[in-house]
Image (cartoon, coloured by chain):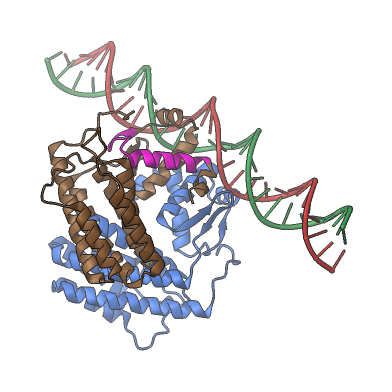
Chain colours: A brown, B blue, C green, D red
DNA sequence: TGTCAACCAGCTTTCGAAAGTTAGTGTCAG
DNA sequence: CTGACACTAACTTTCGAAAGCTGGTTGACA
């Protein structure tokens, strides 16, 4: 699945660029200039151009004619829209997933949860951001939960929205500042509802889960407004 | 709004190509070769390439590395998914639109309906397909209805799904074969519910409207399976 | 001091030919 | 007659330099 992207050069650049944006190595709002990009990723202008065009289609990058490309800027307004859209779409997809998922889906969800449960949230050095490993396991768990949805369209929409939300999560600062919240327990409850095939309850839990996380991000975002200046993190 | 696309060359090609796909001048499943395209649209390979990349992002075109691009093939399965997704998302968007739309939105919807109502469905020569003018007015009416939704994300998703559905509509043959249906009345009812601010009823009507149209398409599609051979219609 | 026009540097866009890949055709040994 | 192999033609991908914009800056003029 990964290989198919690396068969062509813009595909490779696309993947790396995307990972760098989602991984927080490129700041929201930052301009992406071709000379820089092609030097950094060891490629031609054309290849970088195509990679950017693709990312525009995904909503991770914006473009204005003759003024170049930039990482999507974050805004409170958009976060609110995004959150509401996710609450609507993703919970519906989970509902369908729980109703239609087969045994294989169920086992994959259990597996993903097990992994998430065993992955440490904070690393020892940095207690501001969760570890990359945890973020990956978290994404994998949620994807596994949704994977049972038989409707490719709805599933794709939900995953697309999740991805954009991940950008906001990446850039919110105040993690772990929510004393009266037990994220692990929320995940556990989600899994339980899913395996018990209680679609309605699972959807309800996911609604809360998304809304809570978003509130956390909003509070974090208002502390430290978007800095466009900062360069590439090493 | 249109001008911004024409400021750059791939933008122009993108628009024309898109119009040609949506307008049925390019057959679903048809290969899109660069030599042909660049000759037809009087442009370079590079420009055609970028236009195609953008259309891939929109889901109107598919690509496989080293094997070129092609117009998305239509399938019954996908149509079913697409219809269900639209019923879920679009009706929700309409609900929000009716609840939140202001007076300006309301007047635009009335205007769009008036135009649709006065535009003839069939031309005099061709009674198989509705006229281009009707199709345009139809799209405009539905877009106007949804435009009141304050959530940009949900609105964009709904419009994206509509667009893809338009492809299916374009390629279904048996139009006007539904004796026990009055499309104009359905539209009238939708408008009435919207202006009366009966959000729940409007959403319900739209559900039926989408489902009925899709059934029509399904019936048409099973009559004449997808022909990939036919070339460009003049 | 303020305004405006011309200029400039740096970026984006565009092009098409060369290189690389694939699928299809025809040939030959088994 | 069948299968594999090599060859060819056509297409896709890649590149980077030339051309075209844009925003900012300098300098002249009121």
Residue drawn where x is 44% and y is 77% of the image: B218
Image quarter hosting the C terminus of chain B = bottom right
Horizontal and vertical percent position of residue A216: 16, 47
Q: Is residue B63 above or below residue B80?
A: above
Horizontal and vertical percent position of residue B131: 41, 71
For residue A198, side relative to residue B62 (left or right): left
Residue drawn where x is 33% and y is 35% of the image: A25
Q: Is residue B96 above or below residue C29?
A: below
Picture quadrant of residue B112: bottom left
Picture quadrant of residue A234: top left
Q: Per the image, is B211 magenta?
A: no
Horizontal and vertical percent position of residue B106: 17, 66
Can residue A32 be seen in this snapshot? yes
For residue B100, side relative to residue A33 (left or right): left
Q: Per the image, is A20 magenta?
A: yes
Can residue B144 be seen in this snapshot? no
User: Is C17 in front, or is B121?
Assistant: C17
By secondary structure, the bulk of the magenta-drawn segment is best described as helix
Horizontal and vertical percent position of residue B233: 55, 64
Residue drawn where x is 18% and y is 62% of the image: B105
For residue A192, side relative to residue A152 (left or right): left
Seen as rendered, the residue at the extreme bottom is B180
Per the rendered image, the range of residues in magenta is A9-31
């Amino acid at each position: 699945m990964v290989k198919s992207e690396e068969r062509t050069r813009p595909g490779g650049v696309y993947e790396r660029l995307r990972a760098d944006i989602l991984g927080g190595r490129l700041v929201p709002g930052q301009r992406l200039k071709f000379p820089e990009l092609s030097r950094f990723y060891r490629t031609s202008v054309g290849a970088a151009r195509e990679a950017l065009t693709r990312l525009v289609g995904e909503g991770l990058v914006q473009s204005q004619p003759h003024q170049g490309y930039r990482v999507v800027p974050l805004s409170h307004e958009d976060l609110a829209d995004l959150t509401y859209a996710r609450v609507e779409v993703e919970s519906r997809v989970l509902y369908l997933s729980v109703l239609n998922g087969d045994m294989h889906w169920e086992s994959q969800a259990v597996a993903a949860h097990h992994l998430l449960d065993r992955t440490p949230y904070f690393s020892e050095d940095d207690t501001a951001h969760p570890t990359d490993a945890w973020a990956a396991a978290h994404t994998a768990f949620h994807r596994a939960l949704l994977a049972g949805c038989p409707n490719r369209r709805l599933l794709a929409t939900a995953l697309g929205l999740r991805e954009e939300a991940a950008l906001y999560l990446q850039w919110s600062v105040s993690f772990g500042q929510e004393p009266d919240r037990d994220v692990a327990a929320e995940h556990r409850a989600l899994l339980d509802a899913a395996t018990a095939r209680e679609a309605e309850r699972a959807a309800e839990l996911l609604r809360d889960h998304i809304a809570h996380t978003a509130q956390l991000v909003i509070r974090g975002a208002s502390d430290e407004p978007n800095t466009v200046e900062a360069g590439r993190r090493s």
